[in-house]
Image: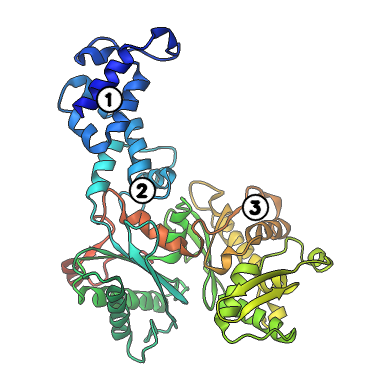
Amino acid sequence: MSMLLRKVLEMLLRRDPTTCSDQQVVFPRGDLGELDQLPTDILFQILRLLGPKEVAKLSVICKSLRFFVSDNRLWLHFLQTHQSDPSWDSVFFAETNLTFGYPLPSLVGQRPQLSFKHIYGERAQVPGAIIIDGGSGYCKFGWSKYACPSGRSATFLVRSTTYLEFGNIESPMYTRLRHFFATIYNRMQVKPDKQPVIVSIPICHYEDTESARASRRQLKDAICASLFDLNVPAVCAVNQATLALYAAKRTSGIAVNIGFQVTSVVPIFNGKVMRKIGVEVVGLGALKVTGFLKEKMQQNNLNFQSLYTVRALKENLCYVALDYEAELLKQNTQASFQAEVDGWFTLSKERFQTAEVLFKPHLAGMQAMGLHQAIALCMEHCHSAELPGDNDWYKTVVLSGGTACLPGLAERLEKELHALLPPYMSNGIRVMPPPYGADTQWFGAKMIGNLSTFPGPWCVEKKNFRQKPRLSLIW
């Protein structure tokens, strides 16, 4: 380090001062010796080259270096370049809004003062967490320090008050969950007692009734019990809708998750699911959309061996038409894709007819409201609730789920919502595609797992769970 500083200093002191920018600021003489002659930006470049560990050591040398080493701009750079988070915006959002756990603090009109040096140091020491994003169709899992999930597996979740089919086993809820979590740990080849775990939970038992609350508590207790019996040190359980909102760097809005069997429209205010306002559920999910494409292909004598082929075609060729009737009149809408098992397929109008079932369920023989109608109804309820704070909190809609990644869906929803709602409600509406594709909820959990304060305010430990089996997690 000393050799690097000496070489850079010699080079700069030999430099013609007329080549320096007029906007560069020269340090007043202090306790830095010859380094006092350097412009501020040059000193910062030197510190950036040294890296976070060496820079941290410099703070003990003298008062002036301690001042510069504590500069937020320097540690902002290190957070951007030396940690695994996808973007600085995500780090800033998480450390500003999620540090204190749930319930989230109200930050209307104020922002906490952040020391990025302190945040960097704490985040570097955080053990991370195993993230298990258990969905109704597919599960994503991995360590929060990873750039993305390390594995995926098929899961099939059937909800009831007594049983939960988490996997393909015929047994009561606790046993199924324990088997499922043990399988994930075996696939990851890690010991459960090494890190806390973050489990994302699909929205279920939607109503704001005593029986629904009891069912949610039962499921929560079964999840915690099964994990603690595997010797997991701490558990954080967060619903998928909230995680999707966090991944989009929002704490309030409407989370729309197109799940395996159903689609849920969930109003969330300051991190809390507003069940009293009402969670809208459409009995149409990814499985029905894939099945509709399957029917279209069979009608056109397109042969395939597996439903996985149909799903691959949906994901790679299908899109949402902004104007369905105009799209029908187009002459050439063909595109081709080579499926792994069944070879090449060419689709034409099926490409946009498939996703149209989200807006017109009757095309698939279903009696249900369209996705845009469910979102509009939810917005009307949110507007009528007149919650304190931002009156437009519900105008941000965040999509999640693999089917929600279809091109054109966000734009079509915005168009339909403007047509359905009066201007005072529709003005300012923004529909956001899944920020991280089908892995959006996993990345929302990753934000929590890498927080400078994790696991403290977000997790429940085994001893606390046993003492207080109804300890409040996020549902």
Q: Mark 3 — residue?
A: 425
From this view, report whether residue 266 is shown above or below residue 66: below
The amino acid type, in three-letter code, at marker 1 is Phe
The amino acid type, in three-letter code, at marker 2 is Pro
Instruction: Assess whether mark 2 and mark 1 are in contact (beta carbons under 8 angstroms).
Output: no
SS state under label 3: helix
Q: Is residue 284 visible?
A: no
Q: Position of residue 312 (x, y in %)?
A: 58, 74
The amino acid type, in three-letter code, at marker 3 is Met
Disc nearest the viewer among 1 and 2: 1
Q: Is residue 254 visible?
A: yes
Q: Mark 2 — residue?
A: 105
Q: How many other residues sit within 10 Å of disc 2, few (<14), some (14-19) or many (≥20)?
A: some
User: Mark 3 or mark 1, which is nearer the start of the sequence?
Assistant: 1
* Quarter occupied by the C terminus: bottom left
**How many angstroms separate mark 2 from mark 3 (CA)?**
27 Å
SS state under label 1: helix
